[in-house]
Amino acid sequence: MATAAFEDIVEDFEFLDDWEDRYRIVIDMGKSMSPLDDALKVEATKVHGCSSQVWIVPKITGNGPDAVFNFHGDSDAMIVRGLVAVLGALYDGLTVSEVLKVDAGGELARLDLNDHLSAQRSNGLRSMVERIRKIAGETVG
């Protein structure tokens, strides 16, 4: 269950044989995000388990399982910032109940990220997914 924005990324990646080109796409996605306000870069929004500094700020519209999930995030590392953008493409616009149904590992595997990210980056990506799922779970109630 991926969004159209995520499917676009998958399609772009399918046309690229070289991981370096894919890496550049991820970095460019991060560069195109607007920065997170420094006032939001606080302990409550920080994602723990990442080697870089990462913050995820939820933007939830509505209540209960049908509330629409969006988030804004940032990182001090360009590749991680790009990974935040990839997760935005995967989750933004879904209801919180749909967020909980997304097989993030399976969807991200379609991008072949696990074979090309360091162990620390892969762990950080999992931590970001866990944080997103936690936020969605708390909203569902």
Image (cartoon, grey):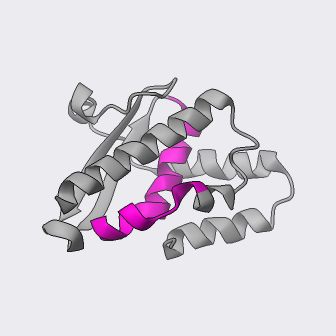
Residue at 44% of width from left, 50% of height from top?
A: 33
Residue at 45% of width from left, 38% of height from top?
A: 127
Magenta stretch: helix, strand or loop mostly: helix
Image quadrant where residue 93 sits: bottom left
Is residue 109 rendered to the left or right of residue 42? right
Q: Is residue 31 visible?
A: no
Which quadrant does the C terminus fall into?
A: bottom left
Q: Position of residue 128 (x, y in %)?
A: 44, 42
* Relative height, residue 127 to residue 132 (above, below): above
Q: Bounds of the magenta span?
A: 77-105
Number of marks present in the image shown: 0
* Relative height, residue 98 to residue 138 (above, below): below
* Relative height, residue 76 to residue 141 (above, below): above
Q: Residue furthest right?
A: 17
Compare residues 134 and 82 and report the one nearer the observer.
134
Compare residues 138 and 88 and report the one nearer the observer.
138
Is residue 13 rendered to the left or right of residue 65? right
Residue at 48% of width from left, 62% of height from top?
A: 89
Q: Position of residue 52 (x, y in %)?
A: 49, 25
Residue at 45% of width from left, 27% of height from top?
A: 49
Q: Position of residue 68 (x, y in %)?
A: 26, 69
Q: Position of residue 125 (x, y in %)?
A: 53, 41
* Relative height, residue 42 to residue 56 (above, below): above
Would residue 100 be counted in the magenta stretch?
yes
Would residue 89 be counted in the magenta stretch?
yes
Image quadrant where residue 64 sits: bottom left
Q: Is residue 80 visible?
A: yes
Image quadrant where residue 117 sits: top right
Is residue 53 rendered to the left or right of residue 17? left
